[in-house]
Amino acid sequence: MITGIKGQLGTELSKLLDEKQLQYDGFDAKDLDITDRDWVSKKVNELKPEVIFHCAAYTAVDNAEDDGKDINWKVNVNGTKNVADAAAEVGATLVYISTDYVFDGTNEGQYNVDDATNPQNEYGLAKLAGELAVKSASENYYIIRTSWVFGEFGKNFVFTMQNLAESHDQLTVVNDQTGRPTWTRTLAEFMTYLVENKSDHGTYHLSNDNEATWFDFATEILKDTQTKVVPVDSSAFKQKAHRPEHSVMNLDKAKATGFKIPTWQQALAEFTSGLNK
């Protein structure tokens, strides 16, 4: 079962499951309101899925600071608790997607899965509370923290840069935030890999390998265009929500499962070449 099937990750995951010829039921917000506890419990008990990939989320990070604060909590915390509890009722494995925003970004090194969390924005607070809801419902779960997600389905940084480059000779991009880009395909493959290989339950970090600033990422995206990318610091772009300055997450635990993680440069190249076919 997939929640949020029409989102950026949910669509990618459904495409992968189709390739694997695996049967699944997918739901978007219209088909299943995860904030409605009775509805979620009824649907999950009807279907009795073996696995629930919980991709539904409120991801408007800046809106979550004010206008979207309530819906952010309802979806990312209450909704996640409803899905986690329903999964526990039928003995389903739950795969929950979390974020690097659970960390404050002050660590100069890499964040390990067991490092202390300290979210600095409302979205990060809600996603961390969602993690706690998952852990309290059952031990049969995978929490996967990811970051800087891009892919074929939905709005993301790659498409934004490509679109801006069509009408701009020069773009300014922040160079003082460091993390790891993540291709939705790599993330979807890891989600299914954990389940298929019966990997140890618990929390994992999954992004593509190698670090980058947003400037590095933009430069790679636009390397074959005439658009010049100029580095600036974050003060040039005022945003409501605080972004971690250094949220590089350690991938050793994910790699220890045997899953092969391509670099973000490799992932980006494969992604963009696929778009041109």
Image (cartoon, rainbow, N blue to C red):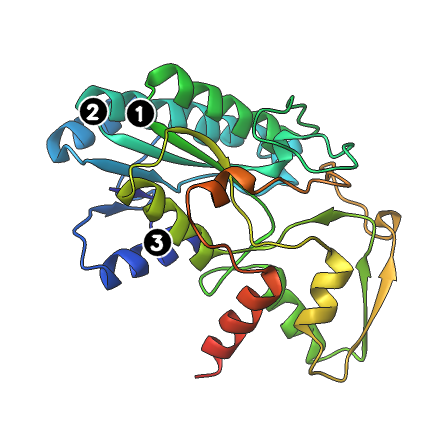
Foreground label between 1 and 3: 1
Badge 1 local density, few (<14 within 10 Å), some, or many (20+)? Answer: some
Q: What is the secondary structure assignment of the residue under circle 2?
A: loop
Residue 67 in picture, x, y percent from top left: 61, 34
Disc number at residue 140? 1
**Which residue does the numbered mark 3 point to in the structure image?**
13
Residue 182 in picture, x, y percent from top left: 55, 54
Disc number at residue 91? 2
Callouts 1 and 3 close, C-beta under 8 Å: no
Badge 3 local density, few (<14 within 10 Å), some, or many (20+)? Answer: many
Seen in the image, is 136 located left or right of residue 2?
right
Callouts 1 and 2 close, C-beta under 8 Å: yes
Q: Judge whether residue 4 can be spotted in this image.
A: no
Q: What is the secondary structure assignment of the residue under circle 3?
A: helix
Residue 146 in picture, x, y percent from top left: 54, 43
Location of residue 52 (image quadrant): top left
Q: Alpha-carbon distance for marks 1 and 2? A: 8 Å
Disc number at residue 190? none
Q: Judge whether residue 133 can be spotted in this image.
A: yes
Query: What amino acid is at disc 2?
Result: Gly
At horizontal 53% and vertical 60% (from top left) the residue drawn is 262
